[in-house]
Image: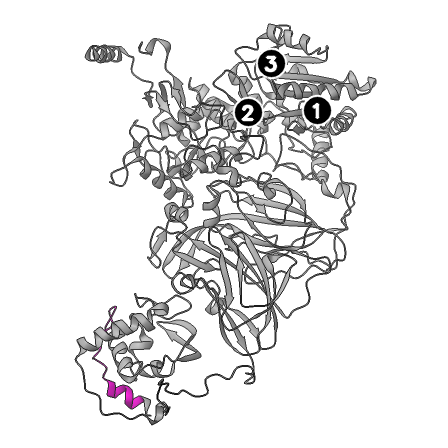
Amino acid sequence: MKTLVALSLLCCSMRLPAQPSGMVRIPGGVFTPFLQTGARPSKITVADFYLDKHAVTNAEFLQFVRANPSWKRSCVTRIFADSNYLQHWAGDLDIGDPRAANSPVTNISWFAADAYCRWKGNRLPTMTEWEYAAGAAPVHYKGRANTRHDLSRLILEWYDHPAPSILPPVMSTYRNSFGLYDMHGLVWEWVEDFNSILPANGGPGPFVCGAGSIGTANKEDYAAYMRFALRQSLRAEYTVRTLGFRCARDIAPRDIVKK
Amino acid sequence: MRQLLSLLFLAIAFVGGSCRRQASVATPSCCAKPPRSSAFSVPAPLTPDASIYQLPGVWLDQHNHSVSLNTLKGKVQVVAMIFTHCGYACPRLVQEMKDIEDSLSASQRAGVGYVLVSFDTRRDDPARLQQYAEEQRLDGHWVLLHGNAEEVRQLSMLLNVSYQPAADGNFNHSNAVVILDRQGTPRQTLEGLSSNAALAIRTIGRLETQ
Amino acid sequence: MKKAHNPQRFRPGAAGHAFITLATVVFLSAGCNDAVAPANFLTDTTSAFGEYNAELAHAPSVPPAPTFGHPEKVIVHLEVVEKVMQLADGVNYTYWTFGGSVPGPMIRVTAGDEVEMHLSNDPNNKMPHNIDLHAVCGPGGGAEATLTVPGHTSIFSFRALKPGLYVYHCATAPVGMHIANGMYGMILVDPKEGYPAVDKEFYLMQGEFYTKGKNGQPGLQPFDMDKAIKEQPEYVVFNGSVGGATGTHALRAKVGDRIRIFVGNGGPNLVSSFHIIGQIFDRVYEEGGNEVHENIQTTVIPAGGSAIVEFTCREPGVYSIVDHSIFRAFNKGALAQLVVTGPADKTVYSGKIKDELFQPGNPVAQSDEETAGPPAPDLPEEVRYKSGHQLFDMNCSACHQNSGLGMPGAIPPLAKSDFLMNRSDKGIGVLLNGIDGEAISVNGKPFQGVMPNLHLSDQQIADILTYVRNSWGNKSPVIQEKEVRKIRNQ
């Protein structure tokens, strides 16, 4: 019986259309969120979704700006991006240093990232999706065998070093078992609902002070603390030199395998 | 005239101290909007640059009419994000807004509106919002808005309200009452549930005279 | 590197002191938290007379005492910088700093002042940061109000209600890691009448570092979370690094100076047993507060706490300042120095007058000079080396380390030491007499240390020198007892 199901799954998946270009299909699963606020159950089920294989690059974002002049540096509406928006570019339609073309685009606001994804027919991943996808173990990293614990160390090592003046290109750090590149170790990434981090009991936000250890799944996941602290410090119009994004997409209903 | 105005704004920005770095010089070739000064000196009049009414999108009000945020322009608006099935915090936010309304002088009332935006895109349809308005005895100064998930998320960003859907269909959210000036620029946020109507009333009084 | 503080310093009381009007409108604006000109809540309800930019000072310096008789508005600009600096000789670390230094610069205000904090996060940083000042009365101590993403500035105001010496630190999750990476400093709130006048004031702050590599392992060392959670640091230091307050960075004073040290402990974990070898504190403001205790030898400074110690040095010399949880001082770097110059006072401290043999039960005590034994036999190198190794472990390794590498800035190395290996006396004189504060140069690095006369026998000295001159890459012939005796009798 089991074989039959597996076979039928295989058949279905063979009939699936090719996945969207540059995206990876992330198989859903059960996930323990880092943040245990009480509002969410301790485990949640994540549905299948597509996620960009790598973060959006400067060159890709340039195409978006060309097609949408209102997102030019000199035109952007100030409530949608602060004045550092794309400040590392040489001009409205000029990335500047050619070495940066394949680096992840940074200095972009949430609104800009959101607009880019919608322009591509996609959307920003939710925090749950992003965390689920980023939790996968590295397939290879500096030739070492890898475990979940190693992932945490790998991330902390990145955080330990100041960012270089030109960010490394995408797909330059590691690939994880979902086939995603650079989920950690290259840039921070926007998520759709980054502003959903709430204080546990109306106290200070969860990621300041000693209260930081209240309501989290793993007190030793320092890398997660850092990601959530960063999210809490952001506002949607902010732009940061080490903050980029990648897009997600729902699985079209016809592609969903009936269980 | 427009040049004169922008000069005036620049002058105000200079005197008042600009709170944001100046926007890069606008290139008229691509931007239809007038050149901006990023003046944000309170309580001097603002450019519309910081208005949240720039957020595109079509909402439905409690009468099932399509509205854009821009239709709120011209009045001082007192805004909160809620959901109608909320049992604890939201009624207190609404009560705080009612207290503000009740405390205004008769001459002030016509110039002030009240807006409730629902997080609950699934359950809070216009009919439900209408029912809620009646339950809460909200008068004609109140607008209750239903939007899609994307619009609600974007608006929450601009109002700096955090929220998170919970497993039971309800929402965890931060509590804020935001006062917008007549252009739609947020000018004061009353955080939390400790009512501070007096502060809001002073602000409204000042904004109405601008 | 940008300076932490506004270079245009505004000295309190200086000409041109800016008085502002009090007609500040209270107006909270949403949607523009960090961008709006700071709303001024505090001056709205109380009377500050004027405002000035705080003059900050990097350790071991202390900002001048404010001299107003009334509350002021003090504006403080602090910038968070993540940067690689030296933790120990050959060891680098990515510090997260307030103002580019560990500890962060000292802020000095007077009780009653309104303090307006501007916390900037360098655009090149990766982390969000904030500041919790223990001088603040209010939730989070400013932490929530100042959570700041790279490339932004947060502003908040507080009133310095209570005098004392307070720690400030970053309180962004994971808090311990931000502190462990160096994000702490101190804010001093002078009492309205000020602290009593002294001749010298210093700023000293302890903190520990958790590196992946063991103490001394060279290279850029990452933070080790496991060691931090177990509270097992590789380094315990004063003023941010091994040697951060020794040698050229030592505190300096003159005989007779009344000295006050503002001591803090950033932690993140360890409680300090603060002690100055060869001093008694006349007065200690316990834990940085009002309570003054007199004649204290060692004072406890909790993590995230402070003490103000006062004393007068009556005798010149190099005083070691230590965490008297003493392995931290000897093995992990918790050593600072106070160099006191000026005339000696033999009525206070004589130095060694005479050395005598002590033999319990023997009624006749003989002095060293009178001992004359039979000629000692020459021994093979391996015998002396083995004995020397044991003697070294007992007498020398605490300072010079088993590695022979010493402690950078404080204890000179023996391994490949030009000072040791090039001496015509082969080092015998040093072991016979010790070194009494004289400035020496070892492999091009200056040391101003004290090595005690260990009162070793000729045989012991020959053994130790045979060992140290043939270890860690050193190579020389065996040293025999007769060579030591010859130099002793010179």
**Residue C360 picture location, percent across and down:** 36, 84
User: Where's the C terminus of chain C, which quadrant?
Assistant: bottom left
Of all chains, the one bearing label 3 is B
To the question of a shared chain for discs 2 and 3, the answer is yes
Query: Residues under labels 2 and 3: Cα distance?
Result: 43 Å
Q: Mainly helix, strand or loop, the magenta region?
A: loop
Element type at mark 3: loop
Q: Is residue C20 above or below residue C385?
A: above
Inspect the image, locate mark 2, and give the three-letter code of the amino acid beneath it.
Cys
Element type at mark 2: loop
Q: Which mark is residue B181?
A: 1
For label 3, the crowd category at 10 Å Cα-Cα, with few meaning under 14, some 14 to 19 and many 20 or more, is many
Q: Which mark is residue B84?
A: 3
Element type at mark 1: loop
Inspect the image, locate mark 3, and give the three-letter code of the amino acid beneath it.
Thr
For label 1, the crowd category at 10 Å Cα-Cα, with few meaning under 14, some 14 to 19 and many 20 or more, is many
Q: Is residue C441 above or below residue C27?
A: below
